Each structure stands twice: as structure tokens, then as C-alpha cells.
Amino acid sequence: MSHNTGRDVAIIGGGIGGLTAALAFARTGARVTVYEQAPALTEVGAGLQISPNGARVLAKLGLSSAIAATGLRALAVTPMDGLSGEQIARFDVSAQTPPYVFFHRAALIDLLGRACTAQGVDIRLDARITDFRPDGSFQTADGIMHPDLTVGADGINSVLRTQINESQKPFFTGQVAWRAMIKQPDQDPVARVWMLPGRHVVTYPLPGDRLNIVAVQQRAQWADEGWHHADDPGNLRAAFADASWQIKSFFGEVEQVNLWGLYRHPVAENWFEGRFALLGDAAHPTLPFLAQGANLAIEDAYVLARSCDENVNLDAGLQTYQSARRPRVTRAIKAANANATNYHLSGARRRIAHAGLRIMGRYAPNAFLRRLSWLYDHDVTA
């Protein structure tokens, strides 16, 4: 029998991590309520990549066919010279199982939301929580709630994180990112990383003939954290004025663009305390240079639900969860931070790095995936 049966679990935040956790807990027999402060379960217009390690969890939660119907199966990852427009190498990911998939965030949120509802999860929108208390209770518009466990899936500015940990100021990485989407029919299902001195651009197609664009620039001027700051597309075009014709043609189509500053937050020291636990960005904000933010949150969600399910003692379950996740997440964040450097090389270092990628692409194309096997081949459901 499941230890979760009859446990009351509150999830703060109806994003990808929160909804995955809600579904995972509900499937172990817990009574789950999701509190989302927005008036609807939506997500900013942006794409994301679900790599095999994240897809394994979603498959285990019964979503394989929904994912195949909603996502776009990726064929390859290709490093590009962002100045000349030349393809440096092509690394095939088409044989990955489960498949590597490109998603629109809103489509994944919708799919998870529907699965949660079908599993009996109570999703409360427009839900403001004003006061977390040491005994694990909190205040909502409907009164004081006393769940057995409250999970903070409330993102980078997590209120619950500051309940459990000393407040730590994030620091600006000296990088800003623009995010945009354009109409672009007949695109190969390939993630392209266009590398330029001090900058890079990642492009990949999404269902519905759209192309997702993330452009990153090193710069001294600070930009606010968060994805919702509108910027003038002319600023994006100016920052990449010397880029290849392909990038210029993409950026010429951009009508709306958001800009945000990239900040490094330390991995939280404590992922739980009493009846509170953290997952995803609330515990370990991740820079977007390994496309693992959503995947790590999905893994967290599954491991948290399973650890609590397998331990009659909640404290032991939460300790198991933190011990299982912290080393892996720390390694992934380190790898993402390293990519930020590798993508932005200039001069001789850039030429040497690109030559190395060309050789790997030509003579050892599988080395790319072997180097990432610790990440992609990992199965938290095993």
C-alpha cells in the first residue's frame, strides 16, 4: 500500500514543475491541490526542449502519446558559425529513446493541466497565498489550509525558498537574453546553436510553423530578471549587426521581443524544512545554456513524489529526495555555466574550438551524445 494514500499535498505554482509534481503525487494516491496565482494556466509564448531524461518521466506518468501528438521530434543539434552562417557539425539525436522533443511551453502546460484534472487534482486559479507558517499551514482567500506537505514550485522568485533558506542575493552574469518567436514554415526539426564572439543564438522550430529564438549577449549593462520585459526589436538587430545572413533574416521578422538579465542563483542549501519542500527553479535556478530547466524540474517532481510515497515518515522521504537530486542538479548547472563560456569565444580560441567540433562531427559524431550520456540517459523512474 502507498504511504501517500490520504496524504494532503499542496503545490504552490502551476508551471511545468508544479503540474508534474501534482500529477506524480496524485498517481500515488495523495489528495493534491495546486494553487496558481495567475487567472489561467498559461505560459509565456516560448519554446522548450524536452530531452530524453525529462521525457522518461512524462512517459512514466502516462503522457507518451500526448507528447508525440503535441511536440515536434528533434532530429539533430547543430553548432553553427554565427558570423559566416556555416554549419560546423551535426549531431544526430533522432535515435534517442524516448525521443528528444521541441514543445511550445503553453502546449505542455495544457497537456499537464488536463492530465492533472483527469487524475482528480484540484487546480485553484487566482489563488493568492499570503502567509506561510512554521507549522506548515498557510493563508488563502478561502481560509487557513493545513496540508501534510506544501511544495514550492513557485519559480525563480520563490516565496517558499526564503522561508526555508537564508536570503541570498543573485548576481548578474554579465549576460542578457532576448526571447522571440516568428512564423517560419518548412524548418528542419533541428536545434541550431549560432556562436559569435561574445554572443550566441539558439533557434529551433515548434509545431505550427513557428521558430523559437533565444539570443544571448555579454554586456556590462544590467537588465531586469524575468521574461516579461518588452524590448525594441531594433536593439536585438543592432546587437547582431555583424551576424550571418540567416540570423539577420530571422531577426528581420521579429515583431515582438522580450529581454531579461541572466542571474546566477546558488543552489538552495535546504530543499525542505518541516512540511515545506522546494523543486525546480525554486530550489535551483538554471541558466538556459543546456536546455535543462524544465527537464530538471520534471525529474525533481517525480523523485519528490516517489520518495514521499516510499517513506511513511515524511521527513525521511524529503531527505531521500534532496540527497538524490542535489548532486545531479549541481552538475547540470555547472555544465550549463560552462556552455555560456564555450559559445562566446573569440579569436584563436574560437578557431580552435570550432576546428575541434568539426573533427568531432566528422570522425566521432557519437562523442557528443556520449559526453552528455550522464544527462540524457539518466532515468529517475528506474
Image (spheres, helix red, strand yellow):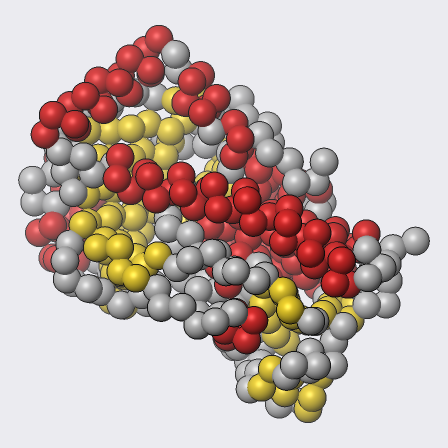
Q: Is residue 97 above or below residue 161?
A: above
> Where residue 40 sits: x, y (%)?
53, 72
Q: Residue at x 8, y 51 (%)?
A: 238
Above-or-below relation of 362 to 254: above
In the displayed structure, 21 sits above or below 78; it is below
Residue 350, percent across and down?
A: 17, 28
- Residue at 74% of width from left, 63% of height from top? 315
Classify 266 as above or below 355: below
Q: Quadrant of the C terminus?
A: top right
Residue at the (52%, 27%) spot, across then down: 373
* Residue at the image position 39 percent from the left and 15 percent from the top: 365
The one nearer the camera, 27 or 293, is: 293
Q: Give x and y (percent) for residue 266.
A: 42, 58
The answer to which image quadrant residue 360 occupies is top left
Give the quarter of the image for residue 244. Answer: top left
Please give the count of numbered marks on the rendered protein. 0
Task: Using the image as rendered, state which of residue 167 and residue 360 is in the foreground.
Answer: 167
| Residue at the right extreme of this rendering | 1
In-front residue for pair 252/359: 359
Q: Residue 286: horizontal and vertical position, in percent?
A: 42, 52
Q: Is residue 204 left or right of residue 63?
A: left
Which residue ends up furthest to the top in the rendered image? 363
Q: Is residue 219 visible?
A: yes
Residue 207 visible to the viewer: no
Quadrant of residue 328 in the image?
A: top right
